Amino acid sequence: MDVLEMTRRRHGEMVVVSIAGEVDADNAAKVRRCLGEAAATRGSRLVVDLSDLRFIDTTGLGVLVRLRAELSEREGTMALVAPDGQVLRRLRRTNLAPLFPIYDTLSQALA
């Protein structure tokens, strides 16, 4: 069963993609497509809201890291919303947290 929900919306100059549920090897390609479309233009400013994400495996983390690198090459930015929980612990445990600006709330990321 696919337990993944994604929404995309504009907030001023930023694009916010909210991901809820679980990201794993089975649905990482779907997440990659959604995030890639949201960040398709040069200089894109992307906020990925992981507040309602319950689980992310290394495949999902790889999607975030690759997208960050692609955005950087195109003068774009990417921030994460990851309040304290499993996702933030996974980012810290894998030493990926320093790669991203990480906020506790969406309103902080948009400020």
Image (cartoon, rainbow, N blue to C red):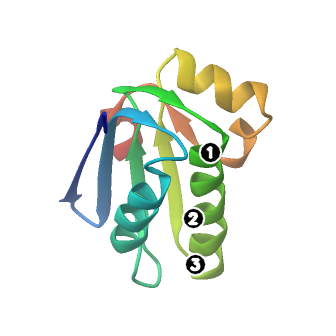
Quarter of the figure with residue 74: bottom right
Give 77 or 1, whichever is nearer the viewer. 1
Identify which residue, 66 or 3, lies in the foreground: 3
Task: Find disc 3 in the rendering and name its residue.
Answer: 75
Q: Position of residue 89 (x, y in %)?
A: 65, 20
Q: Quadrant of the N terminus?
A: top left
CA distance separating discs 1 and 3: 21 Å
Q: Are marks 1 and 3 in contact (CB under 8 Å)?
A: no
How many C-alpha atoms fall within 10 Å of the one at disc 1: few (<14), some, or many (≥20)? some
Quarter-wise, where is residue 15 in the image? bottom left
Task: Say which element carries label 2.
Answer: helix
Instruction: Name which residue type carries label 3.
Output: Glu
Query: What residue did someone put label 2 on?
Result: 67
Residue ranking furthest to the front: 1
Rendered position, 83 above or below 103:
above
Q: Amino acid at mark 2?
A: Leu
Choose the circle earlier in sequence order: 1 or 3: 1
